[in-house]
Image (cartoon, rainbow, N blue to C red):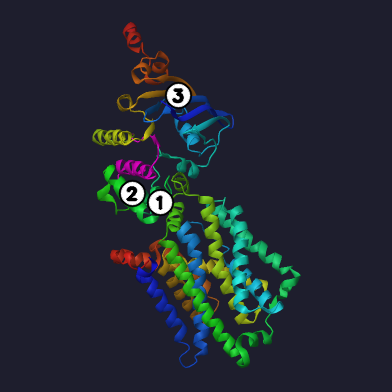
Amino acid sequence: MIFRRPVFWLILIFAALMAFIPLHGNNVSMREDLILVAVAVILASNLNLMIGYTGYVNFGHIVFYGLGGYVGLYLATVRGWNLILSALLAGVAVSFFALLFGLGILRLRGAYFALATIGILVAVQSFVSNFDPWGRSTGLYVPFDAYQRLGGADGARRALWITYFLVIGVMALSMILSLAIKISKFGLGLFAIREDEDAAVVLGVNATVYKAIIYSVSAFLPAVAGALMFYKNGMIDPSIAFEFMLSLEGIVMLMLGGKGTVVGAALGGGLYEKLRSYLLTSPKLSNFHLVIAGALLLLVVLFAPGGLIGWLYRLVPRSEKVIE
Amino acid sequence: MTALLEVNGVTKRFGGLVAVSDVSFTLAEGEIVGLIGPNGAGKTTLFNMVNGVYKLNAGKISFAGQDITDRPPNEVVHFGIARTHQIVKPLYGMTVVENVTVGACFGRDYLKLKPARKVALEVLERVGLADRADTSARSLTIAGKKRLEVARALAARPKLLLLDEVLAGLNPTEVELMIGIVRNIRDSGISVLMIEHLMQAIMSLSDRIVVLNLGAKLAEGRPEEVVKNPDVVEAYLGFPDIVDKLRAAQ
């Protein structure tokens, strides 16, 4: 049972702290910092389902986030639907999209799969850049009254808080999903695929279906988060929705924290995001953050391939039973 | 006896190379059938055809009365055929018991995680790996890895077990142990089809032997018949008259 896992309660405590600390004293700037941390945790956790659990490196993971943003924003603004409903529908639509593409490209393995994921990202970006209902390259804007619909009389200010709590909720769900899959039979099948796909199939794992499902599942929460975040930001356009760099940084986050672990993905996501926002805002090091990300990735791959959590496991082997 | 496995005129071509050509044989319930032949004779290819790794170019394979031709490997397991690999394929990042749990989870009974783990521990006991259950599969010796292969296959609760050279690379003591395991498997009611080069072992274990050479079936029969068959001796065991020839040359 998932409730017996200490990590489950850790996730809830972490999410509760994230939600309530900025609420204390109405600290908006801290909230804006933490929402980026939460998004990083969401992206890294869901990417972990592919890279860490199944062994398939997805370089285009950000496509789910961006597409979710577009579908969500389109429904919430142009159609004027409720934000939560729009975000959920964005998740469903993007998951379905991932399932279709997954069944195609998951026949590929290793570097070829990785290349195909980049191909999908580029193809979707150029499609959206030319798609009229989504505003082509200028994108979509959130009109002010959309916030009032969500936030009531107090309008935007309340709407932003609501969005923040929703993103924290999605973050908690991402981590719980990772944990639930990790301790399930489905997860065992994924790990078998990661270790040796041919052997897994001979042992009875339906790898084709398993891979398509996990690819689709890994798209759902990032798409929901994308819908919420771009709503919060007030606009979306193809270059910010499908930023390849962000996709790569997701991989750095995962490697830094420790792929294949629930806590590692979250830790890597959170730490990397904090580091990045520090570097981006420091006047001397701005635009230098990718150099640091590259160096960090090299150091991790060379000296701590298991990331921070892998390092912890080596230091305290018993921790593997608790910190999953 | 009724046939459990029926292989009927199967052929596999890789481009211009005919790896297996029109091979037919049957295996009855409770039997141990040995599959022998020189390297490149098509033995492992035949295994890969039976468990669905390769699609056939011609022929038919049925198991327990059902047509399993060209079924993918993960479905073949559910019919009740499990196999081991000549070149062992442990799931290295997982523990020994996790490896076997995968076999039990996705095998014929499609068990849930908890009962699967129980079955895994029982099977590990049977093959003598119980004390290594929680160690990494990576840390096993080659003999251990071969036994892990057998354990994983057994955990699927097969009716038929395909053993691909489980004795290769083992020292005499380990061979003894593994022979005991195979006997024990048969005694528990599981039929066995095994590829093996170790003639003494295959002679003592098999009820019948099928000999392959250059992709075709060369002979079939009881072990003592097969080793006397001049074609088999020439193709696989060695020239029968080589001693006479050497004497004559002196």
Distance between mark 1 and mark 3 Cα atoms: 37 Å
Local crowd size for mark 2, using a 10 Å CA cut-off: few (<14), some (14–19), many (≥20): many
Q: Is residue A121 visible?
A: yes
Residue A194 drawn in magenta: no
Q: Which label's residue is closer to the chain start, 1 or 2?
A: 1
Local crowd size for mark 3, using a 10 Å CA cut-off: few (<14), some (14–19), many (≥20): many
Tags 1 and 3 both on a single chain: yes
Q: Quadrant of the C terminus of chain A?
A: bottom left
Q: Is residue B215 visible?
A: no
In which chain is the residue bearing label 3? B
Q: Which mark is residue B21?
A: none
Location of mark 1 (residue):
B111
**Quadrant of the image occupied by residue B175:** top left
Location of mark 2 (residue):
B119
Tags 1 and 2 both on a single chain: yes
Location of mark 3 (residue):
B212
Local crowd size for mark 1, using a 10 Å CA cut-off: few (<14), some (14–19), many (≥20): some
Tag 3's secondary structure?
strand
Q: Is residue A26 left or right of residue A261?
A: right
Contact, mark 1 vs mark 3 (Cβ under 8 Å): no
Contact, mark 1 vs mark 2 (Cβ under 8 Å): yes
Distance between mark 1 and mark 2 Cα atoms: 9 Å
Front-lying residue, B176 or A113: B176
Q: Position of residue B216 (x, y in %)?
A: 50, 23
Tag 2's secondary structure?
helix
Q: Position of residue A148 (x, y in %)?
A: 64, 88
Magenta region, residue range: B138-167
Which circle, 3 or 2, is nearer the viewer?
Answer: 2
Indicate the amino acid at tag 2.
Val
In which chain is the residue bearing label 2? B
